[in-house]
Amino acid sequence: MEAASPSTDHIDRASDFKVSAVKVQRHLPPTAAPLSLPDLMKGILGLLRPARTRAKLERELKNYFGVKHVFLLTSGKAALVTVLNSMKARSSRRQVIIPAYTCFSVPSAVHKAGLEVVLCDVDPQSLDFDLAELRSVVGENTLAIVTPHLFGQPADLRSIKAIAESSGVFVIEDAAQAMGGRDRGQWLGTQGDVGFFSLGRGKNVSAGSGGVIVTNSDRMADALSVLYEGLPAEPVSGLLANALTVVATKMLLHPLLYWLPAGLPFLGLGETKYSLDYPVCRMDGMRAGLLSSWRSRLEESNRCRIKTNRLFRRRLPSFFETRAAGLADHSTYLRLPLLLPTAQQKAALCLSAKNYGLGVSAFYPAPVSMIPEVAAKFQSQRFPGAEALAARLVTLPLHRYVTENDVDRIATAVSRLSGKAEEAIAQGYRETCVSAK
């Protein structure tokens, strides 16, 4: 198989997936964390007594995840910016290592904190850092390593922490897509020096938007507390925007209605954008109130995702047999990642999914090195693993609205990619593993 080209053709192809006209049909959202009417009512109540509601949420999070310190913010991005600023205040180091394939919010948060992004390539099979390369990019000016559990796939924290500790580097667990997931019996997000969750739309549990920082380090908590106490409350305009988002999501997220927002390209649903224009504020009482039932919602959401993951494994057995050490049937994936053999097959699957409302997502359209706002720094560098993921990775929906019939429809679409699709997918994985070594 030919190596992935460092061109941006796959970014251009992503725009072809947009539907030009509204098509009335059952349409799965790529991911979903719906709110109930009682949740909305508790959000209003939280607005009336914010301090009490936030304190209750903090206690519940500490008890559930077994952490000593919790900080509540307006978004996952705001959480990461706050973590980085707290580290920056106590160190002269200024470089932050992130994967070359990750959510665009991660490099934007590093830049918003006034720090320098350093990229490390990823292993397309594990979705984790290329550990050999990680060892080589850690240097004297490295402040922290941001380690995402991408789509809920646990990163190799033991190896990453060993690399970091030998150089006095912080490990930040990006568990934005992995809230409620475990690895070796430990909660994801609680194993590094500090971790954070996202409560945005479509995450494992949602308040429209929101972020949570967790840590067991008293020293880290002291540094965070200094910044946290000085953070402003979100402006009223931000509160109203989040409230409108929550209401609209409540109304339109169901597959019987999602065809409407999905058919309006100007809404930009599912688009991944790099932006520095977002507030870094403490969480308000309304968001905290919307999370009053977060524990039961999170557990039910993750049970559904595990169940649907297993259905896909049974429906596409050859595909998963090629990754015995990769995707696990018990992991709480936010979305199920699937690496196709070619970019053309990805384009065909995504187009079919748009036309038939299957909820399959193209996801991140480019490696971080090709984001226009940061590309100049990395134009002489290649990241083959990240390029392969950007060109060929899709994700399958796992949320509560996905039925067994939906699984069959999606699996059929995958199987029609070629005459012997599962064999082709297996071969694609084998070639990817070889090329990544």
Image (cartoon, rainbow, N blue to C red):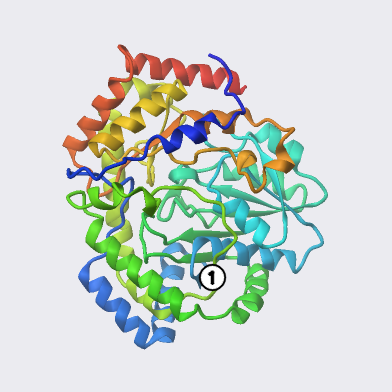
In percent of the image, x 54 and y 21: which residue is there? 433
| Picture quadrant where residue 65 is located | bottom left
Depicted 411 relative to depicted 172: above or below: above
Name the element at disc 1: loop
Residue nearest the observer in this picture, 62 or 387:
387
Residue at mark 1: 68
Q: Residue furthest top?
A: 419
Q: Residue 365, position in %: x, y?
A: 50, 38
In percent of the image, x 61 and y 67: which residue is there? 82
In percent of the image, x 52 and y 76: which residue is there? 282
Q: Is residue 296 visible?
A: no
Q: Give the side of residue 177 with respect to residue 88, left or right.
A: left
Q: Give the side of residue 242 with respect to residue 261, left or right.
A: right
Q: Residue 153, position in %: x, y?
A: 46, 42
Residue nearest the observer in this picture, 152 or 7:
7
Q: Residue 371, position in %: x, y?
A: 60, 43
Q: Of the residues shown, which amino acid type is indicated by label 1?
A: Lys
Depicted 256 relative to depicted 239: above or below: above
| Picture quadrant where residue 110 is located | bottom right
In percent of the image, x 35 and y 81: which residue is there? 46
